[in-house]
Image (spheres, rainbow, N blue to C red):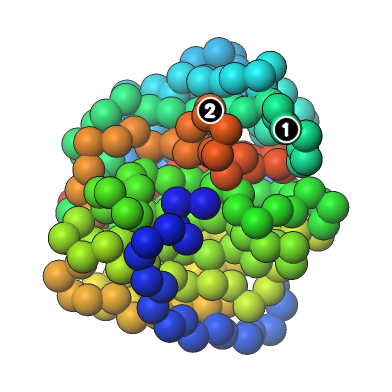
Amino acid sequence: MQSRMSAAVLALVPVVAPAAAARASDPPMLTGMTAHYGFNGRSSTIVDESGNGHTLRVISAQGGRVRPVAHGPGTALAFPGKCTQPICPHVALQSGDSADLNPGGRDIAFGADVLLPPGQTSSGQNVVQKGYSATSSQYKLQIDGTAGHPSCVLVDVNRPVIRMARSSVTTADGVWHRVRCQRAGTRLEIYVDSVLRGRTTVPADLYVSNDLPLSIGAKGAYRDNDQFNGTLDNVWVRITR
């Protein structure tokens, strides 16, 4: 995946905390959201429920599609399952190139409700991403490796060093989990079901800004797209004004 290319990965600190009950069927509060997607409307174009107009379009290749499935009081979107063939279905949801989805040097939080069975893990699966680590700047939530531990990534626009906070627990167990990435000043933290599960330190002046779309479920519809192979709901971004 893009984060494993030429950029170096800085050390991260896992956090082990008591388990907490997941409430991933309850949508997050919309107050102050920069973008929010509950996936309860049409699947061809997906409305930004924050009211900020960041409508998503579905881009696909090789027959890739998203499929609405019941989740809580509404619906979630199921992405293509794991594929090991030379030609696989690819699909991603992408916004327009909106400047207000760039946090710059401000604090940012972003996350999603995720459902990923253990047999559907892979070397790289992108949940939420804006930008690329080697060529621009980036914020990203991903679920990588056979064990399926989620992680949060930030990459500065002038220094292509990957700053990563990786969860100490898996989310690839066939159960819904609510995952949140949060940058507050020099702290980058990852929460699973409202419990802090990993953290790292980032420079106070780390700056994320690029002209690329917000991508959900993959970084694009091309072959090496880090396809997410589970189900997503309540995807959101909140940037401190």
Q: Is residue 178 visible?
A: no
Q: Nearer the viewer, mark 2 or mark 1?
A: 1
Three-letter residue code for mark 1: Pro
Q: SS at mark 1?
A: loop
Q: In the image, is 171 to the left or to the right of 206?
A: right
Residue 2: image x %, image y %? 45, 51
Q: Is residue 67 above or below residue 155?
A: above
Three-letter residue code for mark 2: Ala
Q: In the image, is 64 to the left or to the right of 128?
A: right
Quadrant of the image occupied by residue 175: bottom right
Mark 2 vs mark 1, CA separation in Å? 15 Å
**Residue at position x 48%, y 46% in the image:** 128
Q: Is residue 86 above or below residue 3?
A: above
Q: In the image, is 127 to the left or to the right of 238?
A: right
Q: SS at mark 2?
A: loop
Q: Is residue 23 above or below residue 63?
A: below
Residue 63: image x %, image y %? 68, 17
Residue 23: image x %, image y %? 68, 56
Q: Residue furthest front?
A: 86
Mark 2 vs mark 1: which is more N-terminal? 1
Which residue in the protein does label 1 denote?
Answer: 86
Residue 172: image x %, image y %? 75, 59
Label 2: how many Cα within 10 Å (few below 14, some 14–19, many 20+): many
Which residue in the protein does label 2 denote?
Answer: 221
**Residue at position x 46%, y 19% in the image:** 57
**Residue at position x 27%, y 29% in the image:** 97
**Residue at position x 65%, y 66% in the image:** 149
Q: Is residue 129 visible?
A: yes
Label 1: how many Cα within 10 Å (few below 14, some 14–19, many 20+): few
Quadrant of the image occupied by residue 166: bottom right
